[in-house]
Image (spheres, rainbow, N blue to C red):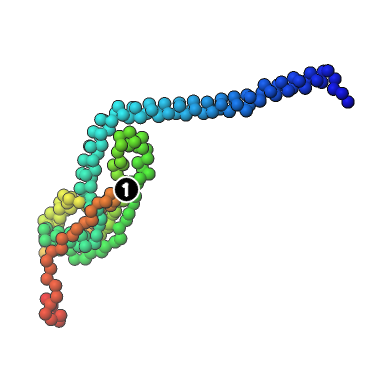
C-alpha cells in the first residue's frame, strides 16, 4: 500500500517537528533547568552574604558583649564549686563547728542530683555569629549538681543566729530550705535539725575541689582506753 501525498506531507511535518523539538528537550531544556538552579543558589548566597555582612558590621559590638559575658561567666563560676565531694562537706562541717561554734550531732548524706544546664547543641542558634567572628562557643557543656544533707545540731541561741548568717554569706552556693528548732530555757541552748542544700556546676574542664584536710590525731596506745 503506497502512502498518499497527504500522508507523506504529514510524516514530513512530524519529522520536522521532531528535529526541531529534539534540541530543546535534549540540550536547551536541561540548560534552562541548570540555569534556574544556579539562579536559586545565587539568590541564597546573596542572602547569606547580606546576613554575614550585617554580623561583620556588628563585630565590635559582639566582641564587647563577649568580653562582658566572659566576666559574668567567671563571676558565676566563682559562686559554685565544680563538684560536691563528701569529704569537702565533712570538712565544711568541721570548719563550721570551730568557727561558730556549733555542734553537728548527726549528719545524713544523700546522692547528688544532676541536671543538664547547657550542651553543644544549645550553641547552634549562634552558629552564624561564631562563624563570622571566628569564635568558639562561650560554654561547651555544663551540668548542675545539687546535694542535700540533713544535720542535727546543738548550740547557743546566739551561735544559731551566727550560723544562719554564716550560711548566707558563704562563698559557695548554700541554702537551708527547712529547719526545726527547740529552745531550752533551763540550758539556754538551741537544738534541732536543718536541711542543707549545696550546689555545684561541673563541666568546662573545671578543676576538682581540693579539700585541705586538717591535722587530726589518729590511733591510741590502747584501744580499750581511747586516744
**Which quadrant, please, contains the N terminus?**
top right
Residue pointed to by mark 1:
141
Q: How many marks?
A: 1
Query: 13 and 155: which one is in front?
Result: 13
Q: Residue 95, position in %: x, y? A: 14, 60
Residue 193 can be seen, yes or no = no
Q: Is residue 125 above or below residue 206?
A: above
Residue drawn at point x = 49 percent, y = 25 percent: 39
Residue 161 place in picture, x, y as percent? 14, 54
Residue 99 falls in image quadrant: bottom left
In the picture, measured across the screen, residue 183 lies left or right of residue 37, that is left
Residue 54 figure quarter? top left
Pinpoint residue 68: horizontal percent, then vertical percent.
22, 37
Q: Residue at x 20, y 60 (%)?
A: 88
Relative height, residue 192 to residue 47 (above, below): below
Q: Depth check: give the residue in front, 55 or 108.
A: 55
The C terminus is located in which quarter? bottom left
Looking at the image, which residue sits at the far right? 1
Q: Nearer the viewer, residue 76 or 134?
A: 134
x then y, percent, for residue 102: 14, 61
Amino acid at each position: 500500500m503506497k502512502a498518499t501525498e497527504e500522508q507523506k506531507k504529514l510524516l514530513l511535518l512530524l519529522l520536522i517537528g521532531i528535529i526541531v523539538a529534539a534540541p530543546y528537550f535534549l540540550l536547551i531544556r536541561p540548560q534552562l533547568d541548570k540555569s534556574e538552579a544556579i539562579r536559586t543558589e545565587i539568590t541564597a548566597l546573596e542572602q547569606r552574604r547580606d546576613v554575614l555582612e550585617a554580623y561583620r558590621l556588628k563585630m565590635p559590638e559582639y566582641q564587647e558583649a563577649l568580653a562582658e559575658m566572659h566576666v559574668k561567666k567567671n563571676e558565676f563560676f566563682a559562686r559554685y564549686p565544680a563538684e560536691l565531694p563528701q569529704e569537702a562537706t565533712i570538712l565544711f562541717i568541721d570548719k563550721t563547728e570551730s568557727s561558730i561554734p556549733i555542734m553537728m550531732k548527726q549528719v545524713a548524706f544523700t546522692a547528688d542530683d544532676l541536671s543538664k544546664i547547657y550542651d553543644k547543641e544549645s550553641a547552634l542558634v549562634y552558629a552564624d555569629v561564631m562563624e563570622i567572628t571566628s569564635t568558639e562557643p562561650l560554654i561547651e557543656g555544663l551540668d548542675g549538681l545539687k546535694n542535700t544533707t540533713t544535720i542535727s545540731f546543738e548550740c547557743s541561741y546566739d551561735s544559731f543566729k551566727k550560723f544562719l548568717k554564716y550560711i548566707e554569706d558563704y562563698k559557695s552556693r548554700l541554702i537551708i530550705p527547712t529547719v526545726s528548732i527547740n529552745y531550752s530555757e533551763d540550758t539556754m541552748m538551741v537544738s534541732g535539725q536543718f536541711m542543707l542544700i549545696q550546689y555545684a556546676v561541673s563541666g568546662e574542664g573545671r578543676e576538682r575541689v581540693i579539700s585541705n584536710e586538717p591535722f587530726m590525731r589518729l590511733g591510741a596506745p590502747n584501744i580499750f582506753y581511747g586516744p
